[in-house]
Amino acid sequence: MRYAKILPVVVAGIGLWGLAASAYTVQQSETALVVRLGKPLVRRDDPGLYFKIPLVDTLIFFDKRLISLEPPSEEVILGDQKRIEAGTYTRFRISDPLAFYQAVGTVDQGRMRLGEIVSSAVRRELGRVKLIDLLTQKRDAVIDAVRNEVIDQSKSLGIEVADVRILRADLPKETSAAIYDRMKSERQREAMELRAQGFEWAQEIQAKADRQSTVIMAEAQERAKVIRGDADATASTLMGDAHDSDSAFYAYYRALQTYGQTLSEASPILLLSATPDFLKTLKNGPPAVATQSPPATVPGAGPLNQTPKG
């Protein structure tokens, strides 16, 4: 009697558990693969509620959306034997869950397998080009070749590769340091060459300027001598005219010039004899000017020249 009351409860519990264990839902962004005893049975792509056999069927869910793969950077040898650190970025989706499950099993294993394919393609394609090619428009062609190779090799895995990119192509630290040192040495050598060339140009310009300066100074001195000679001749002519016009005043004027030159260059004390001829003009003063009568005139002629008396 007691067991008769418990048995319906146990059966109901088992039934509820079986119903809960057999029901499953598929979201819009995923695909479900039902595996029965290790063998793929059915694939569920449409979202909704489905049922399976508890303890017999196993569910494996795969994301329909794009999945990113960005493995660590690895060292690659280029066609010119240069080494670089290449980093890639891949976006893919699982297009055939059944083929994907049979080929690799889980998503993590699929990432690892696809990473190996990308690494192999990158090494193969970069091994054919030089470092300078990665700095020009040939870089796009290299990336396209890598992408096409990865797409072809990943189809058998049930993977659809959307894009493959080479994010980084950096030189190793040791290589970068060596290149930096070489570039520094080359720039220093170029700077020394430019300084030497500049010094040579400066010497040429200085020599040309000195030569032009010498020519200009010689021409200026020659012209100055000509002008000074003309001036001296004019001065001599004027002095001669002044002497002929009034010889006494001319002698007095010359004496004053002599006093000015002599006394300005003398010391504060100047010793002279008691009756020096040097001070005669200073002592006697300017010569007396004789009284002149009005000039005689001749009818129809101008005034007669009069000679001043000394």
Image (cartoon, grey):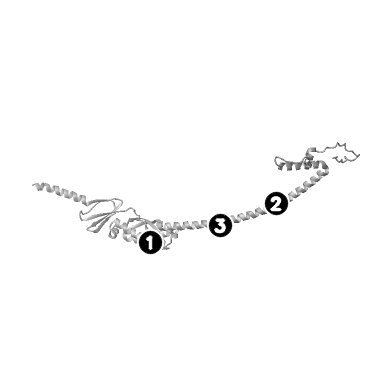
Q: Residues within 10 Å of mark 2 (few under 14, many from 20)?
A: few
Q: CA distance from mark 2 to mark 3?
A: 36 Å
- Tell me the number on the disc at residue 197: 3
| Pointer 2 residue | 221
Query: Which quarter of the rendered picture does the C terminus lie within?
Result: top right
- Tell me the number on the disc at residue 123: 1
- Tell me the number on the disc at residue 284: none
Q: Is residue 151 visible?
A: no
As shown in the figure, which amino acid type bears the numbered disc 1?
Arg
Residue 270, x across and y down, in percent: 72, 41
Q: Residues within 10 Å of mark 3 (few under 14, many from 20)?
A: few
Q: Earlier in the sequence, mark 1 or mark 2?
A: 1
Q: Helix, strand or loop at disc 2?
A: helix
Q: Residues within 10 Å of mark 1 (few under 14, many from 20)?
A: some
Give left or right: position of 56 versus 216: left
Q: Is residue 283 visible?
A: yes
Residue drawn at the location 49% of the way across and 56% of the way down: 188
Indicate whether 149 appears above or below 303. Answer: below
Q: Helix, strand or loop at disc 1?
A: helix
- The quarter of the displayed image where residue 269 is located: top right
| Marks 2 and 3 in Cβ contact (< 8 Å) | no
Residue 184, x across and y down, in percent: 47, 56
